[in-house]
Image (tube, rainbow, N blue to C red):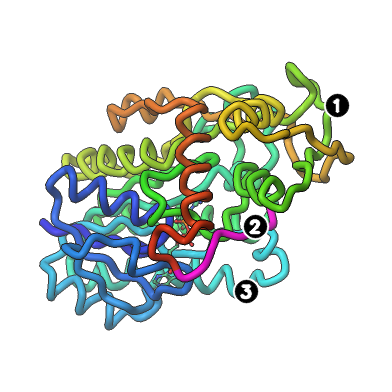
Amino acid sequence: MTWLLTGGAGYIGSHVTEAMQDAGVPVVVLDDLSTGRASRLRPTVPLVKGSVLDTATVRTVIRDHDVTGVIHLAGKKSVPESMTSPLHYYRENVTGALALLEAMRAEDVNQLVFSSSAAVYGTSDADYVTEDSPTLPDSPYGRSKLVSESMIRDAAAAYGLDSLSLRYFNVVGCADPALVEINGTNLFPLVFDALQRGDHPVVFGADYPTRDGSCVRDYIHVEDLADAHVAAVRAVSVGASQKAVNVGCGAGHTVFEVLREIGVMTGLDTTPEILPRRPGDPASMVAATALAERVLGWKAQRDLSQMVASAWHAVTATSQGKPEMTSVPSIGTS
Ligand SMILES: NC(=O)c1ccc[n+]([C@@H]2O[C@H](COP(=O)([O-])OP(=O)(O)OC[C@H]3O[C@@H](n4cnc5c(N)ncnc54)[C@H](O)[C@@H]3O)[C@@H](O)[C@H]2O)c1
């Protein structure tokens, strides 16, 4: 009953790997280490270096490790990069998912949890985004996730695969500096990077129809997200299938609230430089979480201060060279 984690040496994958091990589920990781780091994995975790696009390698890993289920995290995740390199994103994310599904089918592996994204919704104007909200992604990245979800659903209908696609909202925080995110693209890494340079953080738009004029987002601690994967594995193991499930806190924080919390936590001046709105930024994106509670029996537990404290600790420890990392986190592009 080993679970294969593709992309298990990544930021989220390494947290999921730890949560799976802590839950007593045997794991094996397949990762091409393009953005992952072997040093994120405990020595007890078997790591196979290879690409999910290589069906023969995936089939060998499945056979060698007696794999009965897969968490598919491997992929590319930068929205702006997907705009300039769309074919690369379709190859890695869509062809990657296809190759994995073919290998699973050939080896008769019928349980799958997939890393999808709130990017499948595009710019929603709903107060709470439900799984039935329109899916109109704004980027090749979002479309690559939506196409992958569709392929998985079709394969599930045709071959009896039990699967859940988890639509992550804004993933932040860190369990341990050794697992820190590299090239993160949401608000947290952008603000931390500005503060470490001694600059003011930049806020795009302070005239939104929100409680303080700045954008509202649903931030989720990566450890809560990892727990959601363990819950999803359990749900899939008893036959839950074919559903996309939002994974967020179900509560939003404004950009100004996040800056205030970072200021309190770090003691640094987080007074922002206000720039005009960016095109395509919705005023608010908050997950409806009722389905996650029902299907996964899971609810996020950690609050904004825990997210900020753990993320800041990881970034400062890493830049002081404490964890064994090959590079320090640098600014992302969205
Ligand atoms: N970080 C977020 O906020 C976020 C939000 C929504 C969805 N996601 C999705 O979650 C997944 C993990 O994201 P992350 O933040 O941990 O990113 P990450 O870049 O840290 O991890 C991705 C991992 O996949 C590996 N990988 C990439 N292509 C591969 C391939 N072809 N074969 C094998 N391994 C490959 C990388 O080496 C890396 O270890 C991605 O699919 C991403 O799209 C992330």
User: Would you say 323 lies left or right of 76 here?
Assistant: left
- Residue depicted at x 22% and y 48%: 20
Tag 3: amino acid: Leu
Mark 3 vs 1, N-terminal side: 3
Is residue 38 visible in the rendered image? The answer is: yes
Magenta region:
326-334
Label 3 SS: helix
Residue 66, x across and y down, in percent: 11, 67
Crowd rating for badge 3 (residues with CA inside 10 Å; few <14, some 14–19, many 20+): some
Quadrant for residue 56, please give it.
bottom left
Q: In this view, does 183 lie above or below 58?
A: above
Disc 2 target residue:
332
Q: Is residue 333 above or below residue 91?
A: above
Residue 227, x across and y down, in percent: 30, 38
Label the magenta part by its dominant secondary structure: loop
Crowd rating for badge 1 (residues with CA inside 10 Å; few <14, some 14–19, many 20+): few
